[in-house]
Amino acid sequence: MSDEMEEYKQEFIQEAREYLDVMNQNFIKVEKGDVDAINEIFRVAHTIKGMAGFMGYKNLEELCHKLESAMGKVRDGEIEVTEELIDVMLKAVDAIGEMIDRIEDEDSDSVDVRDIIEALTMFMESREEEEVADRHELKPATANLRVDVYISEDCVMKSVRAALVVEALSEVAEVVGVIPDESDMEKETFDGHFVVYLNAPDASVVEDTISKIAEIDRFEVSPVDGETVEMGQAVSEEEAEEKAEGAARAETEAKVEKTEKRVDPGRKDKKKLESIRVNISQLDTIMNLVGELVISKGRLLQIASEYDIPELKEAVAIMDKSITSLQDEIMQIRMVRVERVFSKFPRMVRDLARKLGKKIDFTMEGLETELDRTVLDEISDPLVHLVRNAVDHGIETPEERVAAGKDEVGRIKLAAWREKNNIIIELEDDGRGLDVEKIKQKAIEKGIVSPAEADSMSEDEIKMLIFSPGFSTKDEATEVSGRGVGMDVVKTTVERLGGSVRISSEKGNGTRIRIHLPPTVAIVKSLLVKVANETYAIPISSVVEALYVGEDNWKVIHGNPFLIVRGKLVPAFKLRELFNVRNGRPEREVGIIVEKEGEKYALIADTIAEQQEIVIKPLTGYLAKIKGFSGVTILGDGRVVPILDVSSLLGGDRLA
């Protein structure tokens, strides 16, 4: 395969996967009676079919064609939407996903889909699909806008790009007609210019929609007064003559208008689009380069001060502003909506509920909330575990719920929002809740805690035991969950990202799990502290407050040091002892109060150097196994500073 075709193959794979997410989300909406979702699936299946046909993946093209035909019949009311129909269609979506994976790995779409095609066929009437397709297009409508689109000459898949434009426009307006039609666009003679007639309430929305689509050289939007466009319908000779004359006039007017626009390139109706796809690894590389620029800037500042060069100081100050702006822009590009991860959950909940014989109403809120791409990728699997456990452990069967005086339909809500400097993700269900006594018994049986420790624990502490490795309250393991694998991953991952997990639950009245996360892990605000000649960074997200250590607030009880903070004893740990630093003794030490799992601890340092934003560079190789550090950062003068990981630094093995 040529480099050019390989590039288009990768673009095809990326776009197809995006469309698969759209299909999964909309099939759940179809099952709930959303008519608009039917049209969305029809358009998406049609687009994937067109791209697959162009790329030569006939098996994928055939499956999409069959799915498109079935959705056409659903749209026309010829097939009733049932759970069984949705099951088959979701299997088709899964098969499309499998084909995409195989195309990426082996450049082949050879997946056996005969059973799925046969099942779809059974749901459809024996009438010819082409007749049904023709009937879809026999709907005359009046257009008020004409859009001339010119695809870039270097676009290889012009017909596919045209289909994407039509699909995008159909989301914001009624597409009345397209000239030339799809079959003519797929011919080699198609030069990339096509006309779309729309019935749209607002031309600016149309312009904004097209401007976001790649590989469009230019487009022109012009009003149409009362023009009727009929697709695929026979008309009388008089009507045909009138239409031909109208089309000729419109073409002449369009040519005049295009000539005028070439003379006046400043016209707003003519737009040129410049948008590209960027590989995520490239963003990471750019972020690292920005970090190197920060280091170089620091060295230049040091040289300017050392040799007293005012001109260099001024130049570096200007450069500093540019680097800060560049850093902010890269960070903004890295931010993605949580919808990217949340979108897979409606389908997952639906499938699990069907398998377990449960009825569940699953809702999501705050899909527009943004997180750093790295944080979102890391939190994806833990969220999967939480949602699966809510379906399996949390929500009861319809019979159990009715017996308990509840609605037979269980409710699960997944929400996200920004709160100060944190992103909150919350999963709430109205299921059976947590049985504190059962959790305590299971924890003792599995040796997680001793009977004496269990008796001294609060209810909240006992509830947190569900996040212990190997813990499960299920008497028997199931396919879905209950093997004690997963919940511990949630807590470990969240804390590694600098976040925390909280759980609240009442037996019989549901469970709420709330996750606090920093919006980004690439650049964080940190407190730089000194221990002898060494500097360490503590993420601000872990710091509660700081205070000086003196005889009045330092106590040693039974050999264990404590710091008195507002009348409460806080366990204290000297960084000198943790890191075995022997040289020098500070005149006055400072206590950094940090929080871990709701408990406060004091880290005792020699002094606080400063507060600043730092770029985190993760530890790799053998260094990745070192406990107590989440990575390192490089200061402006070139010094490498370790970043303390409060969670692992104050872990059970460390405290012991």
Image (cartoon, grey):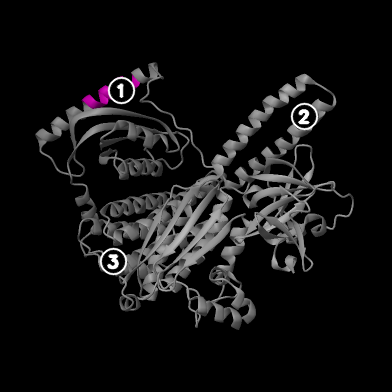
> What's the CA distance linking mark 3 and mark 2?
72 Å
N-terminal label among 3 and 1:
3
Is the residue marked by circle 1 packed among few (<14), some (14-19), or many (20+) residues within 10 Å? few
In the rendering, at what x and y percent does residue 411 appear? 36, 65
The answer to which quarter of the image holds residue 441 is bottom right
In magenta, the rendered stretch is 249-259
Q: Quadrant of residue 76?
A: bottom left
Q: Taking 552 as reference, is 228 above or below it?
A: above
Q: Using the image, tell me which numbered label, if any, was put on residue 121.
A: 3
Please give left or right for residue 398 compared with residue 318 in the image: left
Residue highlighted by disc 2: 301
Judged from this view, the residue extending furthest toward the right is: 583
Q: Calculate the distance from the C-alpha at mark 2 to the C-alpha at mark 1.
A: 60 Å
Frontmost of labels 2 and 1 is 2
User: Which residue is found at the position 78% from the left and 33% from the top?
Assistant: 299
Q: Using the rendered image of the protein, determine whether residue 563 is visible from the camera's viewpoint.
A: yes
Q: Residue at x 45, y 33 (%)?
A: 153
Numbered mark located on residue 255 in the image:
1
Taking the spot 71% from the left edge, 48% from the top edge, the residue there is 547
Name the one closer to the observer, 493 or 21.
493
- The amino acid type, in three-letter code, at marker 2 is Leu
The crowd level at tag 2 (other Cα within 10 Å; few <14, some 14-19, many 20+) is: many
Reading the chain from its start, which is encountered first: label 2 or label 1? 1
